[in-house]
Amino acid sequence: MIKEFLSCYVRPTSQSVEKRVLWLVRHAWEHVPFYREKMQTAGLSASDFNSLDDYISKFPETTSAEYRTYQQTGHSQGLIDEQQKLDGLIEDRSSGSSGITISVFRSPAEYELNRARALWHLVQAGLRPWHRILAVLPPLQMRKNVSMSILQSLGIFRRTTVDYTMPIETVVDVIRRERINVIYGQKSFIRLIADHYMQHGIEPPELELLIPGAERVDHYDREYLCQVFRPRRFGEFYGATEPYLIAAKKMDSDYQIDYKAVFFSLAAPEDEAGLTKGNILVTSLINEAQPILKLELGDRVAVRNYSQLSTLGATIAKVEGRSNDYLHLPDGEKISGATFYASLEYFPFMRQFKIVQNDVNDCTVMLRVAEKTEEKKAQVEAVLKKILDGKIKYAVEYVDAIPVGPNGKTKILVSSARDAKSAILHR
């Protein structure tokens, strides 16, 4: 892994990224049935792509739902390089936060490079060999040798791993016993750890480095976690199972894209307030065994300098949330989760919120606020009234905690009324 780690210090150029993307297009055309069919359906072949701009403008997009459905209906082999044998590949499996889990098969070399990249990003964020690290990982990753296991075996890093199925009391005891001063990993579970300290009046550790990730980190999370742990350095990771790490962020910066491993563009980009917004499309520059080309992850992002995309000058200013999270209204219309996020995020006393819909006719808005004063309640409820009044019945609940889901994440909007419009039409 040392060699792969050192290779991460080589900065990519737009020419090297273009060369790699065009090679991946040819590779997919020749060896991956799924993408060959996509190009043929669009009336294209590999010869139609001669520049990065060609790829951005012409290569067919694939939604996450389409990709996952294709795999779940018995076509998984069609996503993989025909030259590869499954028993020689390593499987990465998602948490299923989008509703359907997905498996990405990587070659041992690709897997090792991703481990090296994870360590490289941690070092860039401020991790040092003498730090005492707590890694908050999904249970599946707990059963693997991930990220720093080789270096740890050599005594270079001291890392303890926990997962969100463990009792919080056990985790807090581990932090005390191991004198932890660095925490990184699953954001929602790190928040639960912070809650435990606050609710029980226990003095939390002052951290050298804190890096939440594995899901969207909003400014509520950032402010709260920094208030509790007072880290000297703070960062965030943005990624997904398919391309792995996409970008990293320091406290007051944009998310910097890891152009050595990922290229991105936007579906239906729209300019708004000096930024360009749209659903992110990702291309893995590492995956060859199971290529990922212009895959729409389902996240809506705001991008700075989008016009400089092909020269690697674009950065992600904000991850606004899942673009496929919707509140379904009785008249068949929808309100996106991003609407609630944009409307509620600027209240300094807001700590968390979640909208839950089990029926097309009503929903519940769960709010976790710093102070439950009548004045603050009135401010928030006025905003909710503007969004929801006359459109759907809703109840507002002020809560002390918002539970994580079975995948260890906290989504801001969960609706089981997916077929609202069709239900109305068939009444």
Image (cartoon, grey):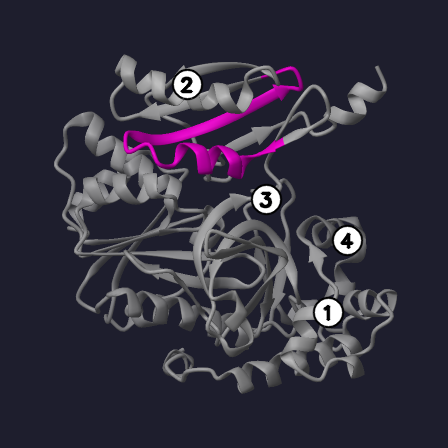
Q: Which numbered tag is attached to residue 389?
A: none
Q: Amino acid at mark 1?
A: Phe
Q: Calculate the distance from the C-alpha at mark 3 to the C-alpha at mark 1.
A: 21 Å
Q: Amino acid at mark 2?
A: Glu
Could you tell me which secondary element the residue under label 3 belongs to? Answer: loop
Could you tell me which secondary element the residue under label 1 belongs to? Answer: loop
**Which mark is in front, 2 or 1?**
2
* Residue 304 visible in the picture: yes
Q: Which numbered tag is attached to residue 323?
A: 3
* Residue 90 visible in the picture: no
For the C terminus, the image quarter is top right
In contact (CB < 8 Å): disc 2 and disc 3: no
Looking at the image, residue 243 sits to the left or right of residue 210; the answer is right
Residue identifier under label 4:
70
Task: Farthest residue to the front: give it.
Answer: 273
Image: magenta residue range: 335-362
Going 22% across and 45% down the picture, which residue do you hit?
226
Q: Earlier in the sequence, mark 3 or mark 1?
A: 1
Could you tell me which secondary element the residue under label 4 belongs to? Answer: helix
Q: Calculate the distance from the C-alpha at mark 2 to the C-alpha at mark 3.
A: 24 Å
Going 79% across and 21% down the picture, which residue do you hit?
423
Q: Earlier in the sequence, mark 2 or mark 3?
A: 3
For the N terminus, the image quarter is bottom left
Q: Which numbered tag is attached to residue 59?
A: 1
**Which mark is in front, 4 or 3?**
3
Circle 2 crowding by C-alpha within 10 Å: few under 14, some 14–19, many from 20: few
Measured along the vertical axis of the image, is residue 351 above or below residue 231? above
Q: Which numbered tag is attached to residue 381?
A: 2
Q: Earlier in the sequence, mark 2 or mark 1?
A: 1
Q: Calculate the distance from the C-alpha at mark 1 to the C-alpha at mark 4.
A: 19 Å
Q: Amino acid at mark 4?
A: Tyr
